[in-house]
């Protein structure tokens, strides 16, 4: 029988994929008789070496035993990334000649790199996982299976609210289907009471909102970065991390503050020429709106926030980063109203490229 490898970033979606696989393999057989589940301890856990050895022995005993009152035996090994090369050796030997009545399922989730010998042994394993981990895709599949529909921005509300927490979609749709019934067409007012807490969001959405001049949106995203956790963001971000991320983005914008850069292609090449050119295009639009003076003001704000986060202000870390985000977003919002003057773009510029906004960059950490 084939070996299976279940993977996925979101643990809830990964567990659902495992559940569906086991249901498929059982074919109606008694789960309590057919399924053996074992979880490997982490390498840093106390007694982990002995624990892993014990799990491997138990897995091999189960895998090499014929099924009892069922057609097959299903052996599930969770967090298999925790196996060292020595731990994995007996399993690799078994995989070269597996029992034809045993379904061996390896489930990712422990983190870390799989030892090469085991990875090679699992190359022929059947890969199983979520079709997609994008919240919109998961929502569409779940609502289709449940027989409900959304209209009037309800789907967008769900996606925006849950952010990257796609694993929460299934439970939400189950609740909505149970409440309103199959065939229901739900609007924003129907969905809102069932959303629960806001989900995490990708960090880059903060700089997108800042550059878009959306103060309320930027502050909402900042709050979620500072407070919300999820499988993809197990810990909230620290204000210093957020400052570093914003500073890194504005350093890229600084590169585009050059009169020789005026097209999307030139901007893309200036930023390294890798991947999509869309971020370069948006960055160039921001720079053209802010101008060199606007960028200089932005770096003044970043420099002051750096000092304040290190004790120059009694406002506190979260208050300091909120003020920074609000001020930068307001600066970008004003810049969107019309193109600012860029370095070297006018004959009245007395210092040319030497007076660019980067003159303050050297004063920052």
Image (spheres, rainbow, N blue to C red):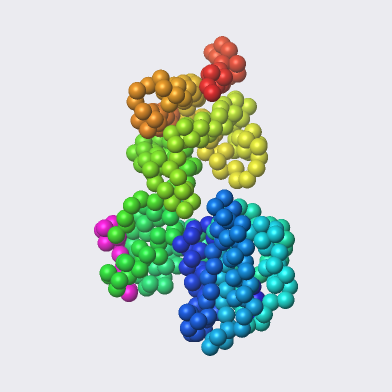
In the rendered image, residue 237, in percent from the top left (x then y), is placed at: 45, 40
Residue 290: percent from the left, percent from the top? 47, 27
> Is residue 174 left or right of 293 when viewed as pictured?
left
Which quadrant is the N terminus positioned in?
bottom right
Relative vertical location of residue 155 with respect to residue 305 in this rendering, above or below: below
**What is the quadrant of the C terminus in the image?**
top right
Give the residue at x 47% y 32%.
Answer: 240
Snapshot quadrant of residue 51: bottom right
Residue drawn where x is 40% and y is 61% of the image: 169
Residue 58 vs residue 157, the one in the foreground = 58
Q: Is residue 186 magenta?
A: yes
Residue 87: give x, y in percent of width and height: 66, 61
Residue farthest to the top, as pictured? 350
Q: Is residue 184 magenta?
A: yes
Q: Residue at x 53, y 22 (%)?
A: 364
What's the magenta region? 182-193
Residue 200 in the image, given as x and y percentages of width and height: 42, 49
Q: Is residue 189 left or right of residue 136?
A: left
Q: Is residue 294 visible?
A: no
Q: Is 117 above or below relative to 258? A: below
Nearer-the-camera pick, 218 or 104: 104
Residue at the spot x=48%, y=66% of the render?
15
In this view, 310 is above or below 204: above
Most extreme residue toward the bottom is: 69
């Amino acid at each position: 029988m084939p070996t299976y490898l279940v993977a996925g970033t979101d643990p809830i979606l990964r567990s659902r994929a495992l559940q569906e696989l086991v249901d498929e393999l059982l074919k109606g057989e008694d789960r309590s008789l057919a399924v053996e589940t074992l979880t490997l301890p982490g390498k840093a856990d106390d007694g982990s070496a002995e624990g892993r050895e014990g799990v491997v022995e138990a897995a091999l005993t189960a895998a090499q035993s014929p099924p009892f009152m069922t057609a097959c035996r299903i052996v599930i090994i969770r967090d298999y990334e925790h196996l060292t090369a020595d731990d994995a050796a007996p399993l690799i030997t078994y995989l070269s000649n597996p029992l034809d009545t045993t379904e061996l399922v390896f489930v990712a989730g422990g983190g870390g790199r799989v030892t090469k010998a085991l990875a090679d042994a699992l190359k022929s394993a059947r890969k199983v996982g979520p079709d997609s981990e994008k919240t919109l895709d998961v929502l569409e599949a779940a609502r289709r299976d449940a027989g409900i529909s959304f209209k009037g921005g309800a789907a967008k509300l769900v996606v925006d609210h849950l952010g990257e927490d796609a694993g929460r979609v299934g439970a939400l749709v189950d609740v909505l289907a149970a409440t309103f019934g199959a065939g229901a067409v739900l609007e924003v007012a129907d969905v809102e009471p069932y959303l629960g807490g806001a989900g995490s969001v990708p960090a880059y959405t903060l700089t997108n909102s800042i550059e878009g001049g959306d103060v309320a949106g930027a502050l909402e995203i900042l709050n979620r970065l500072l407070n919300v956790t999820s499988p993809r963001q197990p810990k909230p971000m620290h204000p210093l991390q957020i400052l570093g991320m914003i500073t890194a983005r504005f350093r890229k914008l600084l590169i585009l503050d050059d009169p020789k850069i005026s097209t999307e292609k030139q901007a893309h090449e200036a930023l390294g020429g890798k991947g999509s050119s869309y971020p370069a295009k948006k960055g160039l639009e921001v720079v053209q709106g802010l101008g060199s003076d606007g960028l200089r003001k932005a770096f003044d704000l970043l420099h002051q926030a750096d000092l304040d986060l290190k004790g120059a202000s009694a406002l506190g870390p979260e208050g300091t980063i909120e003020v920074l985000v609000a001020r930068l977003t307001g600066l970008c919002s004003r810049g969107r109203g019309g193109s600012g003057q860029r370095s070297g773009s006018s004959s009245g510029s007395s210092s040319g490229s030497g007076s660019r906004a980067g003159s303050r960059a050297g004063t920052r950490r």
